[in-house]
Image (cartoon, rainbow, N blue to C red):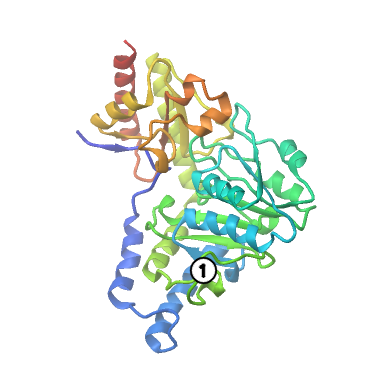
Amino acid sequence: MEGIYMDHAATTPMDKQVVSAMNPVFEDVFGNPSSVHSFGRKARKYLDQARRTMAKSIHANEKDIIITSGGTEADNLALIGTAFANKDRGRHVITTVQEHHATLHTAEHLENQGFRVTYLPVGENGLVSVDDLKNALTDETILVSIMYVNNETGMIQPIQEIGNVLKDYQEIYFHTDAVQAYGLLDIDVKEYGIDMLTVSSHKINGPKGIGFLYAANNVKIEALQFGGEQERKRRPGTENVAGAVGFQKAVDLAINNKTDRNTSYQGFKDQFISHLSDSGINFEINGDEKKSIASIVNISFPGTNVESLLTNFDLDGIAASSGSACTAGSVEPSHVLAAMYGENDERTTNSIRFSFGIFNTTENIEEAANRVVKIVKRLTA
């Protein structure tokens, strides 16, 4: 039985064009980009080209791109790095209850270090309220961190509105984890008032182990590690040149094919939901479907539970998830759905995230829907 991959929000298969771009670098470019000799300069040239591509994709200055090991490190650097560098101005940080654990656990660490963190609630639609943010701002606030697109529900948060609000508070930095948004939504960090932005390569068909943090020139940030002076002293360590080249190619492909990918993924989502509806099974979409990204849908199947669903899906060749990949091995209720509906709501333990990507087809989406319907009918019989 052919496996059908519907977990692109967890990670994406590498595009063959990305692999082809990286192979010559593995074979021929071994110099340290910090070395001044010709071998180092050759590596530096590739790294600089990749950085320019990353910066251009969000309308940023290339000097403001910090290459990291991925989204988690970028979120940590954004929160801890700015909190400690600006603690003399205040110790209040604002985030939301539905953030990725890379942000939530970092915020908890800041609380242990004497910072005060406000966790904004979300409504049943999965969206944070701009008014709640306004009411949470204080004279002590130094940082606001709100994800662009929720990784479990796909809900697109009001980032531009928040950015506009915070433009009146020049002393408060605005960070957004854009890991699920990048490559599908238009992002202009200067126009939207974004001071810091997180991106991860393996979410856009690039290699794992590399990402970037955009940090505007005015952002005062402390390095989390100590060593060399790479990344303009903000992130020491020899850069991953081959990874950067692969990331660059993935960025090029994502930006150039953004419209087509959105159309394609939305088509897959609509087809999948329509097939479930026509089958007569009982299900409910979590969040406001009209305000979600094209690539993600989170569905509740009443009368079932996550463990049995995922086990049966896997046995039938369907790869899906109960939420964030970092907690996919856990049977705990989704903290995102608990924030939306309450901790005791059955939707927190019977919901599955399906996420679409470039390796899906109308044929395998239809086949996946058929298998899902068969399994749900069996489990609820």
From the top left corner, tell me how far across and down residue 246 is, in percent: 39, 63
Task: Name which residue lies at 69% across and 59% down.
Answer: 87
Viewer-side residue, 122 vs 24: 122
Q: Amino acid at mark 1?
A: Arg
Task: Name which residue lies at 29% across and 36% down.
Answer: 4
Side of 317 where 123 appears, left or right: right
Q: Secondary structure at mark 1?
A: loop
Viewer-side residue, 282 vs 171: 171
Indicate the quadrant containing the C terminus: top left, top right, bottom left or bottom right.
Answer: top left
11 is higher (above) or lower (below) than 76: above
Viewer-side residue, 100 vs 194: 100
Please give the residue where the numbered disc 1 appears in the rendered image: 235
Q: Say which quarter of the image contains residue 189.
A: bottom right
Side of 364 where 136 appears, left or right: right
How many numbered markers are drawn? 1
Asked whether the viewer can see residue 288, the reply is no
From the top left corner, tell me how far across and down residue 225 is, in percent: 50, 67
Indicate the quadrant containing the N terminus: top left, top right, bottom left or bottom right.
Answer: top left
Asked whether the viewer can see residue 273, the reply is yes
Residue lying at the far top in this picture: please name it: 381
Residue lying at the far bottom in this picture: please name it: 37
From the top left corner, tell me how far across and down residue 376 is, in percent: 34, 19
325 is higher (above) or lower (below) than 251: above
149 is higher (above) or lower (below) than 211: above
- The residue carrying pointer 1 sits among few (fewer than 14), some (14 to 19) or many (20 or more) residues within 10 Å by Cα, namely many
Task: Name which residue lies at 38% across and 39% down.
Answer: 7
From the top left corner, tell me how far across and down residue 328 is, in percent: 38, 38
